[in-house]
Image: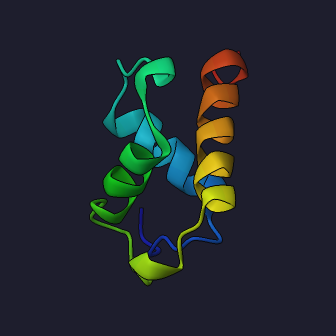
Amino acid sequence: MSDNLNWDATYAIALTLKRQYPNTKLENVSLNQIYLWTIGLADFADDPTIANERILAEIYQLWFEEILHGDK
């Protein structure tokens, strides 16, 4: 990915996490884990302190939907 990821790019973050953690069972993943994985992404370049539950839940939901519908 050529662009840096930020908290506004929830869909791009979800896709990146899906690729980076392909065998993850999302029912076992907490929002804190989503946070830690996101700020650990090589392309992530935003202020980690502005993350909130809404942003993290959106990333989680998009990742879940991508697993269900993204491979069609």
Residue 66 % position (x, y): 65, 29
The number of callouts visible is 0
Q: Residue drawn at (47%, 74%), measured in percent from left and top?
A: 3
Figure quadrant of residue 61: top right
Which of the image's four quarters has the C terminus? top right
Q: Residue drawn at (65%, 71%), measured in percent from left and top?
A: 8
Residue 31 % position (x, y): 49, 45
Which of the image's four quarters has the N terminus? bottom left
Residue 50 % position (x, y): 53, 80
Of residues 47 and 71, which is closer to you in this image?
A: 47
Q: Is residue 6 left or right of residue 24?
A: right
Q: Is residue 64 left or right of residue 26?
A: right
Q: Residue drawn at (59%, 66%), measured in percent from left and top?
A: 52
| 17 in relation to 40, above or below | above
Of residues 31 and 60, which is closer to you in this image?
A: 31
Q: Is residue 65 left or right of residue 32?
A: right
Figure quadrant of residue 48: bottom left
Of residues 67 and 27, which is closer to you in this image?
A: 27
| 50 in relation to 57, above or below | below
User: What is the residue that sits farthest to the bottom in this orientation?
Assistant: 47
